[in-house]
């Protein structure tokens, strides 16, 4: 990209995304050298845009809040009005615009000067909006923190209150935010439980990005489908599962080691109760990378067989 003004606008647009950009990635995106990126960063700073740089192997550039607004051609009143409107839309999960609201809000709040952020917060706290459904409300700041962590990607810590009221602290690798039209859910990999989980965002408190980056894991299905199946499992009947692994108990992931039959045979035999959809449980078992045989129930055997057939056909020569 040889047109300097156009390149600067493209660079500024990338930096508005709430994440840290390595110089090499910016250079690749804009098809210029790393030296050109450094010069362009200095030009943006001279124009008043507060671009921070961090050193080291994981270093990069990030646009931080400052005195300058991005080139949206908005005055202060318009910026405040848009931020308040986006907060309302995101916090109440307005169907059809919820994801766009969170993305736009994350970008706008990333660059709002502190004096305008204060005005937005003051106006928001002075207004009351009617809720619908069960009245679950989400703090927009929690949503924007999560959206930024997903975009990073950065590990996320937060306090969580479960359905039964039990409270815990979680460290997760955030994958996607999903809205059902009345509630927000975070799909994430729980580091301590070594498994994928769905979290209701209105039950989250004290969320903050740790700054620790990670290589995103692959969810075995669409995030929307994962949430849908999780919601369908609530209130469903549990079923008994019995699986024989061609591996010792020590080789099993933590969520299966707890279900190993004491004094059982080696290789390991596990028994537990599950509410997971058989298709999802089959995918989780396949992700262990271990050979296994499903003994019970028949529905899980069928789901594992279907998954095996799909994977076999995917690698079969055409």
Image: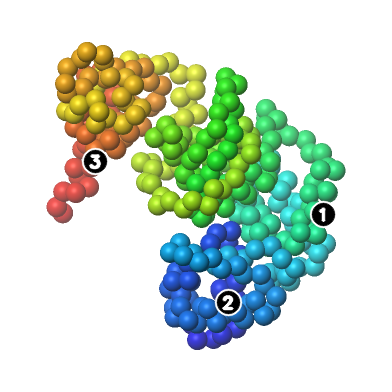
The label nearer to you, 1 versus 3, is: 1
Q: Quadrant of residue 53?
A: bottom right
Q: Check disc 2 and report the residue beneath it.
A: 41
Q: For mark 2, give the secondary structure.
A: helix
Gap between marks 2 and 1 measured at Cα? 30 Å
Q: Is residue 174 left or right of residue 200?
A: left
Q: Check disc 1 and report the residue beneath it.
A: 119
Earlier-in-chain disc, 2 versus 3 = 2
Let me know if residue 160 appears in the view: yes
Q: Check disc 3 and report the residue beneath it.
A: 310
Considering every residue shown, the one lying at the far left of the view is 317
Q: Quadrant of residue 140?
A: top right
| Nearer the observer, 275 or 258 | 258
Gap between marks 1 and 3 measured at Cα? 55 Å
Q: Is residue 257 left or right of residue 100?
A: left
Let me know if residue 294 appears in the view: no
Q: For mark 3, give the secondary structure.
A: helix
Q: Is residue 181 left or right of residue 271?
A: right
């Amino acid at each position: 990209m040889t047109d300097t003004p156009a390149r600067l606008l493209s660079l500024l647009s990338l930096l508005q995304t709430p994440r840290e950009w390595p110089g090499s990635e910016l250079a690749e995106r804009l098809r210029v050298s790393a030296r050109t990126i450094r010069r362009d960063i200095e030009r943006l700073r001279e124009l008043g845009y507060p671009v921070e740089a961090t050193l080291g192997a994981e270093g990069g550039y990030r646009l931080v809040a400052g005195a300058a607004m991005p080139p949206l051609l908005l005055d202060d009143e318009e910026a405040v009005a848009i931020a308040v409107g986006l907060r309302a839309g995101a916090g109440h999960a307005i169907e059809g615009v919820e994801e766009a609201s969170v993305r736009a809000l994350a970008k706008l709040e990333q660059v709002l000067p502190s004096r305008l952020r204060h005005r937005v917060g003051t106006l928001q706290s002075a207004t009351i909006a009617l809720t619908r459904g069960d009245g679950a409300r989400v703090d927009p700041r929690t949503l924007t923190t999560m959206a930024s962590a997903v975009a990073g990607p950065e590990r996320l810590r937060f306090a969580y209150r479960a359905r039964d009221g039990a409270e815990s602290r979680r460290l997760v690798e955030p994958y996607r935010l999903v809205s059902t039209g009345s509630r927000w859910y975070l799909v994430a990999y729980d580091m301590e439980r070594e498994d994928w989980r769905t979290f209701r965002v209105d039950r989250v408190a004290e969320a903050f990005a740790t700054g620790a980056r990670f290589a995103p894991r692959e969810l075995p299905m669409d995030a929307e489908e994962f949430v849908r199946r999780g919601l369908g499992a609530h209130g469903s009947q549990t079923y008994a599962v019995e699986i024989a692994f061609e591996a010792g108990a020590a080789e099993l992931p933590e969520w299966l080691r707890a279900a190993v039959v004491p004094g059982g045979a080696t290789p390991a035999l596990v028994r537990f109760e599950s509410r997971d959809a058989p298709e999802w449980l089959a995918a989780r078992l396949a992700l262990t990378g271990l050979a296994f045989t499903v003994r019970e129930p028949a529905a899980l055997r069928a789901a594992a067989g279907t998954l095996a057939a799909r994977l076999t056909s995917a690698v079969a020569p055409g």
